[in-house]
Amino acid sequence: MNQFKELDWGCLFDNLNYKNIFWKIRLAECLGGLNNPCEVKIILELIKTDDPDLFVSCIDSLRTIDLSRLTKDELDNINDKISFAKENASLPVRCVLEAFTRKFISN
């Protein structure tokens, strides 16, 4: 993915709706730390899911990305979903969600 061109990222984004949850989870796990704004766009699209495993994978990937360009609304939406997800989360999942909140939301 380090060698993706803008066209590759666009193709990946355009085809997200045609992929199954397992594929999307693996994609989210591969993203993060690439220093590419397209990866944030893709994760923000994936994070709209109702699937808890995909959501946590997205949050985990976002922890490694510079999110300074996100709007307050985007961060608030993520925080709302995190609050809901924490209600029934296991201890490891809760740790991931709280680590994200401490790093990006609480500032």
Image (cartoon, rainbow, N blue to C red):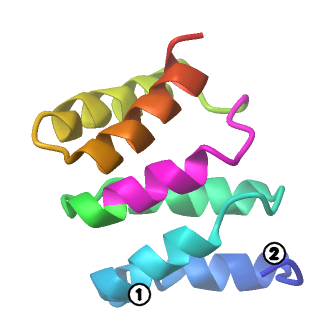
**SS class, disc 2:** helix
Q: Is residue 50 above or below residue 91?
A: below
Question: Looking at numbered disc 1 in the image, what kind of residue is underneath it?
Answer: Trp
Quick one: label 1, few (<14), some, or many (20+) residues within 10 Å? few
Residue located at (36% from left, 54% from top): 56
Picture quarter with the N terminus: bottom right
Q: In front of the other: label 1 or label 2?
A: 1
Q: Is residue 60 magenta?
A: yes
Separation (CA) of disc 1 from disc 2: 21 Å
Q: Is residue 33 left or right of residue 101?
A: right
Asked which secondary structure carries label 1, the reply is helix
- Give the quarter of the image for residue 17: bottom left
Residue 93 rendering spot, x and y as whole percentages = 32, 48
The image quadrant of residue 47 is bottom left
Residue 80 spot, x, y in % from top left: 28, 28
Which quadrant of the structure image shows residue 88? Answer: top left
Residue at the location (32% across, 54% down)? 48
Assess whether residue 103 is covered by the magenta stretch: no
Q: Residue at x 51, y 52 (%)?
A: 60
Residue in view at x 52 percent, y 58 percent: 43
Residue 6 image label: 2
**What span is colored magenta in the figure?**
55-68
Mark sitting on residue 37: none
> As drawn, is 41 to the left or to the right of 56?
right
Is 70 or 26 nearer to us in this picture? Answer: 26
Q: Amino acid at mark 2?
A: Glu
Left or right position of 100 against 95: right
